[in-house]
Amino acid sequence: DMSKLPPPSSLFTPHMTFVYEDCSWAQKDAYRILTYSLERGSISPMDKERCHRVWRDFLAHLFGMNLTWMQAPALAYASTPHSAPTVVSNGEESGEDDEDDDSSNAGGGNGNDDNMDEDVDVTEIKDTKSAGEVAVVGDIDGMGFLLDQQPIPAGTQVSTTYGEGSISSWRKSDGVYEVQLAKGGSAYLRADAILCTIDPVQKSPLTEQCRSSDSEELASPNDRLVIGTQSLYLFFRLHQILVKRLATAKALAYKSTNDKSIRTHVEQMVGDGPEDIGRKRYDAFLSMVYGLIEGGYTNTQGANEGGKFEERVRCLLGQGAYELATIDKLINHIQKHLQQLSGDETMHSLIEVYRRHADAGSFKPNAFKQEAAYISDGENMFAFQYCPMPSSDKSVMFHEYLGDISSTAESSDDNGEADDGDAEASDSAGDSEPPTSKRQRRS
């Protein structure tokens, strides 16, 4: 029923409308699968970094995923013993450090490696309005020593174990950063408590000019708007299919447990009630997907092995799981388009426009389209509006094919040139040169 969907902006006459169901968990599972596939892929580390930045700076905000949740695995890994590599300057110092660590741990002291979890857990951040200080967190050895050689400049936005913030200063004597947290308060953190740096949003006079002349905003403050290339359209289309298939897999997992008519046709599992068995069945499916990405269900051992994953899914979830058999191909296609997004200069510029609108607190459709027209460089553009549905675990995405919108910017330039020419014709006839186009062309 389209009447129950959030209304699109005036920019849209949607050609397609996709509904995301079970967003609270399906989006997260899809992200975990795609990032795992990205890490296990054979692309270069630079390409992997670019793809992660697209997720962190753009896709995560669009889909409403929290950056702290996304970096939770990195935080858990950093807090485990011996997680950071040891930097050795020479053999003698390395031996002395090892002896000191062993003696401190044996004596019940505050050994950095064995007690790193305790250091992070017991630290309590205090608001600067009340106390104005925070206990020092982290270990200066390991990764901290690496960053000690190249300190993060002041003013850099970072993501820490306590949320996002910006570097205020750095003390070289003990390798401690003072971080002004976005949620309020200051923290004094060692380098291993800083997860990563965040690219700041680049300001643009063109964005401010376009936004000042556009009075329309999206209906809901939670709605998102972006204009992108065909690669972004293909990514969104395939990503929505992946989310839908994960929702199907979970529904089949619980149905196979509760439906007596198909219970005899699926693998039996033991658990504390139907809910627990259904959860275990879905977790088993996810484990199979990770194994498929890892290469555990390939056809390298013959044609009979090629259908191993499909047969295993059918035994686990029933006959209705046929559409899940090709999920590996779906993941590969999504990763291909994500990699194209990360290396596309036009798409990178459009992501920066998206970030500027998000940083301003609202999305203005006509201003976004006007600026995208200068950047598009003659490419076919697509518009997307992502709208979470109130009081529901669903969201909807509107798609519209815009085509080549660069002519919009050119006609705007021509109108401006004609107005300027009428006013200055008597003074500069024959002497003035035609102004250059504002459109940003890729090198």
Image (spheres, rainbow, N blue to C red):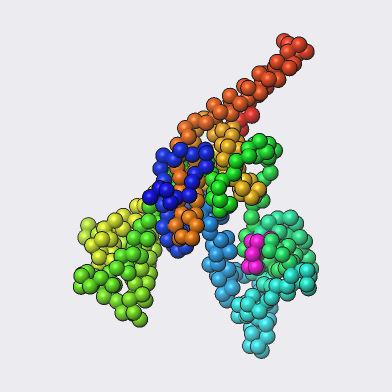
Main SS category, magenta section:
strand
The residue most toward the bottom is 107
Residue at horizontal 31 percent and vertical 62 percent from the top: 297
Q: Quadrant of residue 303?
A: bottom left
Q: Quadrant of residue 96?
A: bottom right
Q: Is residue 309 shown left or right of residue 368?
A: left
Q: Which residue is more in the foreground, 130 or 296?
A: 130
Total numbered labels placed on residues in the image? 0
Residue 53 location, x and y as percent?
56, 52
Q: Is residue 427 shown left or right of residue 164?
A: right
Q: Is residue 115 visible?
A: yes
Q: Is residue 263 shown left or right of residue 142?
A: left
Residue 338 location, x and y as percent?
47, 48
Residue at horizontal 66 percent and vertical 89 percent from the top: 107
Residue 436 location, x and y as percent?
65, 24
Residue 33 location, x and y as percent?
43, 60
Q: Is residue 229 visible?
A: no
Q: Is residue 171 above or below residue 43?
A: below
Q: Which residue is more in the foreground, 200 or 175?
A: 200
Q: Is residue 395 above or below residue 234?
A: below
Q: Quadrant of the C terminus?
A: top right
Whether 163 is among the magenta residues is yes
The residue most toward the front is 3
Q: Quadrant of residue 156?
A: bottom right
Whether 186 is among the magenta residues is no
Magenta segment: 159-165
Residue at horizontal 37 percent and vertical 72 percent from the top: 279
Residue at horizontal 73 percent and vertical 13 percent from the top: 425
Q: Is residue 153 shown left or right of residue 84?
A: right
Q: Which residue is more in the foreground, 81 or 157?
A: 157
